[in-house]
Image (cartoon, rainbow, N blue to C red):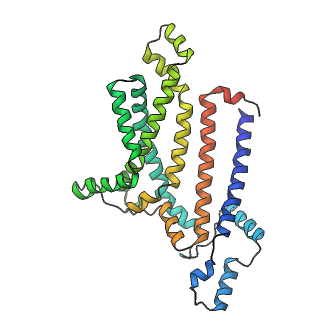
Amino acid sequence: MTAYLLRRLVSLSLSLVAASLVIFLVMEVVPGDPASFMLGINADPGALAALRLQMGLDEPLPLRYLAWVAGLLQGDFGVSYTYRVPVSELISERVMISLPLTLYALALSTLIAFPAGIIAAARRNSAADLSVMGATQLGVAIPNFWFAMILVLVFAVNLRWFSAGGFPGWDAGFGPALKALTLPAIALALPQASILARVMRSSLIDTLEEDFMRTARAKGLSRSQALWRHALRNALIPVLTIIGLQFSFLLAGGIIIENVFYLPGLGRLVFQAITQRDLIVVRSVVIILVFAVIVVTFLVDLAYAAADPRLRRQRR
């Protein structure tokens, strides 16, 4: 297990280095000059040169990359061109909305998908199976932003159970903050729950047809006992993969939902930074999201090893 863990840590580190290099180079080849964009096309050349010097744009490309990486390692993401505050402060404020929203949506997705997928697999070709598959097909087909607007129309405008948007802050209390995240979390969770339920059903059906399941039934276990004791754990490998991908998607891809509900999260921050061409904010948020994706992938690999002991014995 130790050797497996070390190999995954080395892979994680190399992936992060490669990702940082790609992100930096992509930001550098974006056309236009950030200093000119900030001061306008009729800016004084002296002021433009001073701003470029302040932003470090006159330094060679390798030195700028090394300085950026060194700042990342120290927790210094630079200063936003637009907001004139440290980027780390912007990220720390926004992540306290995006991360709880992601975890809330992922929890809802898992709580919905697991029972639905298990029921559909255990009662294959029954009315329950057809109902679950029909509902999941509908959930996959509906765009989440359209579903979000329907939720606002029904539960905020007509029933007035929730607010149509905004976030009161965690200082207002856990209840009001969680209530403000409920509709966005549902809008994010239901399409993902549909995908996860279908994967759970397919994986569980394949596992139920394996030879060891027939052996378990031959030893006297009922179908439900064999399912819960043997099939479910062996069917979790593809399901864990989807959960890991969903966390990454929900964290990095919630920009549309955050704009629909006017949530000041990371997605909305990236959107505003792109429109204002605040490249230091865009670059910093993207590397944070990439780091989160890589760490989640690492944790999923550990979950693989816990679910399947054969992975712990694999050699390089």
Q: Position of residue 81 (x, y in %)?
A: 58, 76
Which residue is rendered at x = 70% and y = 41% of the image? 8
Which image quadrant for residue 130? top left
Which residue is rendered at x = 44% and y = 12% of the image? 222
Q: Is residue 155 above or below residue 236?
A: below
Q: Residue furthest top?
A: 219
Q: Which is nearer the eye, 198 or 63?
A: 198
Which image quadrant for residue 286? bottom right
Q: Position of residue 153 (x, y in %)?
A: 27, 56
Q: Which is nearer the eye, 155 or 277?
A: 277
Q: Which is nearer the eye, 90 or 154?
A: 154
Q: Residue furthest left?
A: 158
Which residue is rendered at x = 46% and y = 52% of the image? 100
Q: Is residue 233 above or below residue 270?
A: above
Q: Position of residue 315 (x, y in %)?
A: 76, 31
Q: Is residue 296 visible?
A: yes
Which residue is rendered at x = 47% and y = 50% of the image? 102
Q: Position of residue 73 (x, y in %)?
A: 70, 60
In the rendered image, the quadrant that contains the N terminus is: top right
In the rendered image, the quadrant that contains the C terminus is: top right
